[in-house]
Amino acid sequence: MACFSVDHLDEGTALLLDVLERRGVRTTCFVEGRHGEERPAEVQAIVERGHELGMHGWAHEEWHRLGPDEERELAVKATAALELAAGVRPQGFRAPAGARSGETAAVLASLGYRYDASLGDGMRPALLRPGLAQVPFVWGGVDGAHYLADPPAEPSAVAAEWERTLEKVAASGGLFVTVCHGAITGADPARLDAFDRVVARAQDAGFEVVTAGEVAARILSEAR
């Protein structure tokens, strides 16, 4: 399976969604809760365009450094703000900077979340606890790990690396997840073209291209 996800609500996010929609692909957008208050129309537009909405903290805090009370307070606040803006309650979470705390799973479960899409053990989905799946990513699948390097990677090199990863996953099974940002991939036409090339390659290779929520639903179903 392949999952092309989007983090943040940046300038260029709409362009990423355009690329995916031209390919007939739905994605999961993990959005900071503050945008539910600051940019509610754009949050709502994600859902109106047919994509999933996930929660990405309140204002991109270092989530794994939060104390238990602050973590719960921000998770409740972010969830409510996104639900009010979009009209649907987010079912998935991705920790800002990727790392969750020891309390995150319990907080998410108490708020009705179905999955966590933070860093995990490789690229194989798992069950974190009853009713809560993990849909992990690895840093090699994050656009910023390549384009924010010094010097930045060439888009063609990023596409080639992701295509090689697709080949490995096709041979061994598992899940390939990319994490793209509007202000990184969406900010450059060559990067958008490279991303489009990877999505097309996944489709041509027969990958099932799904949202993070669809991956989580399978994990939870298998666990019953």
Image (spheres, grey):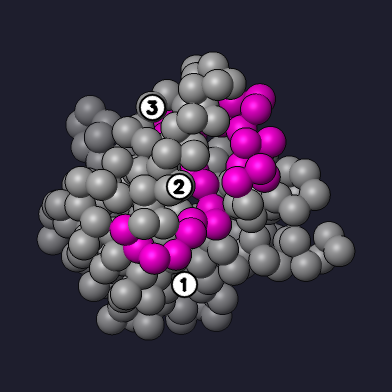
Residue at which label 3 appears = 61
Q: Earlier in the sequence, mark 3 or mark 2?
A: 3
Q: Residue 84's quadrant in the figure?
A: bottom left
- Left or right relative to 120: residue 61: left
Give the secondary structure at mark 3. Answer: loop
> What is the x, y in percent for residue 125?
68, 53
Foreground label between 3 and 1: 3
Foreground label between 3 and 2: 2
Is the residue marked by circle 3 packed among few (<14), some (14-19), or many (20+) residues within 10 Å?
Answer: some
What's the amino acid at mark 2? Thr
Foreground label between 1 and 2: 2
- Left or right relative to 22: residue 208: right
What range of the chain is rendered magenta? Answer: 85-111
In the rendered image of this protein, does residue 98 appear above or below residue 23? Answer: above
Is the residue marked by circle 1 packed among few (<14), some (14-19), or many (20+) residues within 10 Å?
Answer: many
Residue 83 showing in the rendered view:
yes
Q: Which mark is residue 79?
A: 2
- Which one is in front, 143 or 70? 70
- Left or right relative to 67: residue 109: right
Give the secondary structure at mark 1. Answer: helix
